[in-house]
Image (tube, coloured by chain):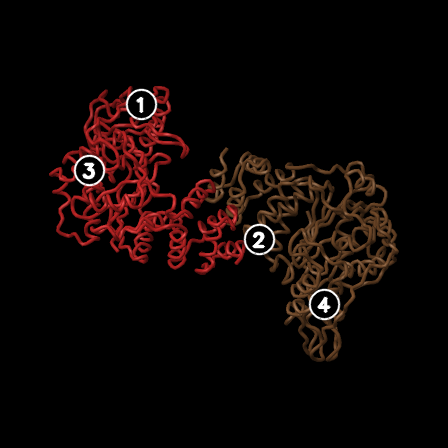
Chain colours: A red, B brown
Amino acid sequence: MDAAHIIRAKRDGRALTDEEIRWFLSSYTADEVAEEQASALLMAIFFQGMDDRELDTWTGAMIASGDRLDLRAVSRPTVDKHSTGGVGDKISLPLCPLVAACGAAVPQLSGRGLGHTGGTLDKMESIAGWRAHLSPQEIVDQLDRIGAVICAAGAGLAPADRRLYALRDVTGTVESIPLIASSIMSKKLAEGTSALVLDVKVGSGAFMKDVGSARRLAETMVRLGTAEGVPTTAVMSRMDTPLGRACGNGLEVTESVEVLAGGGPADVVELTVALAREMLALVGLHDADPGAVLAAGDALPVWRALVAAQGGDPDAPLLVSTDVRAVRAQRSGVVTMLEALAIGLAAWRLGAGRARKEHPVSPTAGVVCLAKVGETVEEGQPVLELHVDDPDRLDAAMEALEGAITIGDEPPPPEPLVIDILRP
Amino acid sequence: MDAAHIIRAKRDGRALTDEEIRWFLSSYTADEVAEEQASALLMAIFFQGMDDRELDTWTGAMIASGDRLDLRAVSRPTVDKHSTGGVGDKISLPLCPLVAACGAAVPQLSGRGLGHTGGTLDKMESIAGWRAHLSPQEIVDQLDRIGAVICAAGAGLAPADRRLYALRDVTGTVESIPLIASSIMSKKLAEGTSALVLDVKVGSGAFMKDVGSARRLAETMVRLGTAEGVPTTAVMSRMDTPLGRACGNGLEVTESVEVLAGGGPADVVELTVALAREMLALVGLHDADPGAVLAAGDALPVWRALVAAQGGDPDAPLLVSTDVRAVRAQRSGVVTMLEALAIGLAAWRLGAGRARKEHPVSPTAGVVCLAKVGETVEEGQPVLELHVDDPDRLDAAMEALEGAITIGDEPPPPEPLVIDILRP
């Protein structure tokens, strides 16, 4: 086997053999294929793609590069959710306890945020004392006892993906459907879940800007998961404007607790219930009524148990920022757009996100949308609230918000939050 | 400037700005852009190409990465030749003294062979004592005095190309016309010649297998050289069967001396004279008659002076191999094909070439074509002669020659050696 030969084959549009894919990825993980050869292959894949068989083998080889969690000792059926990332996307926080309250176990192994969409672990860590790192045994025990875990994916899961992901970031090879699909699915399948629901975001604030590419990604991942024996459903949902009102770590925890208590923004409730319904259906819990469970506040005790089990105090108040600035409506009318990308970037610049993975994030910084799309505002009324501890960050955040708010005379035509659902 | 941003731009088909190209190449040379980023950009260029303005800037940046020889002190007009590589291609050896004998100066800065086509320096080094390394001052002095230099291109010339070439080799990005053209032209322009003739080989034994891609490469290089102020002509010549009869380092020196003495194979003479004519025309020496000069043996004294000036003894006999084996005609008839690639590979396996750049080559090993295409042979008559010191190498060489000789009833239709000439 020869790396340059494999790169040229893919470059020239030939499907790689299973042996070539396995040799390349295992040699790369063993430092026997150089970074520059891996990046050349990734760029060739960007242009030439991979067929279904290649992608199954590629994903399998990424999983085989590390450990695979064994959740068979968990007495409930396991089902997880993954989101491709959106602004204000705190859905995992209410969803995980809700699905647990309905009888399944949710092994939510997450990452940290990089860029304008936040990471689930960053949000949870705004709860003082809460710890993200659990051992495999702790994960199994907590799933068995509470039905819900939110924790860091260990470095031993799909290490080839970890290295390829970092390489893709610096070599301009992120935006490739087979590479995105295999990266997400190798991590999720390595965590040992028996079923999976994907929230594939579409829109100006999402990684996938158009429905066509989002659908191709969704179909690819549903097929991949199902081929690996893990029934997978993809929910395609809109991401043009933030989900809910809160964008920022602690702010999103607070909003999630409101949803768990039976309140909270309608869009967060809608998507949480829609995803819960798909997760429960995949593991055969067809009688559960997640909408009723959420409205009755019956998932809140699971949330409190999860926080406590991982060292947090569910009753401790969250930190709040020292400074809050309003962004006001420049005219009276109906809010027709709040740009997710701009608001995500503003929250990021206020301190909610990080530019490099070793940077810390602020638990308090962020943006709250006091008015949402379709709501009426008067001139001078606050539309956004900027939460910040370091007022020096305000200018850069305000700059990101230039043109982010559109106010018109007529309410915009209603757009469904869930665009489509692709089942196995 | 950001490397990943530049890679993505090229990947998505955008022309890079001059600033982006210069920044990327100078940062790469300064080790501030990583190998994996350079290889990703090379692969993106493989797919998306470069327009004329990008390619001019790219080539200029490669030249600017190092020194440029200053040959202005040479009293004669300077003109060089470059060949894209062919089996039995010893043309530089008679050509360089011939053009000098006609009044120009030829700064033939060369490389070593890698793969089935030999390197000019490897051939010259079969002359005992001859040294390939000259200082810039020695080059200028010898050009002024003798009009001919064949020597190693110093490491200071186009160092960015040196690194990119090694990178392309291991990352499957060799076969790209803009990358090939800029690699050749940056080295040739850095050597300071005032005019340039390119021998672009086409055929089964050449890097470019078809006339269309060879023509695109030739046109690209002619345009590039001319844009840089160095008038450039490209001669497109056939490379399906070896040039001349000898393939191997010392064997080719012997054949070259025959040509310089006014004899030698007709195809070597034809191509040598054709290239000399173009070189002399580019520097305005229209009255010279290189065919007559060569036939009269008047270039031989220049050859002898060149060998002696660089430490060799032009009268010393060359080493010969300890073992010579014949490959015989399996039937009587006319030779219709001698495959250049197979014969080049056989010579390489006998010891004439190297698999890795640190390996030595044999001065004596190689293949001599006793019969050439179009010549009549009797069954059992030797067609090829394999020269070797290590008989263990014979089996691998014989394997390469499987199917290399075709003998038929009718002579093949004559094909012109020179396909086309592209002038500035």
Task: Point out the frontmost of discs 2 and 4.
Answer: 4
Give the camera-side residue of A275 and A191.
A191
What numbered label is drawn on residue A305? 3
Cα distance, mark 2 to mark 1?
A: 54 Å
- Separation of marks 2 and 4 at Cα, in angstroms: 35 Å
Q: Earlier in the sequence, mark 3 or mark 1?
A: 3
Whole-percent x, y for residue A366 in the image: 29, 27
Q: Amino acid at mark 1?
A: Val
Secondary structure under tag 4 reads: helix
Q: Confirm whether circles 2 and 1 share one chain.
A: no
The chain that hosts pointer 4 is B
Q: How many marks?
A: 4
Q: Is disc 1 on the same chain as disc 3?
A: yes
User: Disc 2 marks which amino acid?
Assistant: Glu
Question: Between tags 3 and 2, which lies in front?
Answer: 3
Where's residue B352, x and y in %? Answer: 71, 60
Q: Nearer the viewer, mark 4 or mark 3?
A: 3
Residue pointed to by mark 2: B175
Instruction: Tell me the residue that label 1 is attached to.
Output: A388
Amino acid at dot 3 = Ala
Residue under label 4: B391
Residue at 80% in and 45% down: B105
Amino acid type at mark 4: Pro
In depth, the one of B51 and B184 nearer the eye is B184
Same-chain check, marks 3 and 2? no
